[in-house]
Image (tube, rainbow, N blue to C red):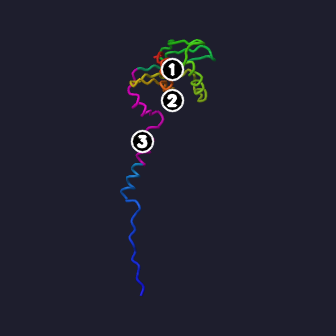
Amino acid sequence: MAIAKQPQKTRPIFPKSFLILVAALLVSSVAIVVLNVAPGTHYQDRLALGKVMQQREIILMQEGMGIIDVLDAETGAKIAVFSDKKGGFVRGAMPALKRLRSINEVSQQEPYMLVQWESGGLTLEDIALNKRFYLNAFGKDNAASFAELL
């Protein structure tokens, strides 16, 4: 007489509570990433940089490789004029800023926002392209050349 096999109860590899916890972690991770990289939010930046201490909209104008005029966007008054041998980092940054705008078909007369932050950070924001450049990353002296324009 043959012995009948009894069906064995199988246990799941992972408990249900563990799978729910992993799913919740994945959903919250995706939500955090989406909320922090959404265009225009700069949420993490605001946390790290603190409050705006000083800001000014400026227009950077350069004809060819010649003189650079820095204008106050609100009043149109000249803030600074850099000749061929002057301007240091401002002059050095101009080709990259002009190229970025020409690639995106944005007028060179659109203003930038120069911002001094509570943390000591200094940023140049291309308002038209919604791009932020961290000037402190280029060194104290280079950031100082832009800070003088505030």
Q: Are marks 3 and 1 in contact (CB under 8 Å)?
A: no
Question: Of circles 3 and 1, which is in front?
Answer: 1
Q: Is residue 129 above or below residue 61?
A: below
Disc 3, SS: helix
Query: Which residue in the protein does label 2 denote?
Result: 131
- Say the numbered circle drawn on residue 38: none
Amino acid under label 2? Lys
* Image location of residue 29, percent across then percent down: 42, 45
Q: CA distance from mark 2 to mark 1?
A: 19 Å
Question: Is residue 6 toward the left or the right of residue 125 in the image?
Answer: left
Magenta region: which residues? 26-53
Q: Which residue is mark 1?
A: 142
Seen from the viewer's position, the closer of residues 76 and 101 is 101
Amino acid, disc 3: Ile
Three-letter residue code for mark 1: Asn
- State the residue in front, 131 or 116: 116
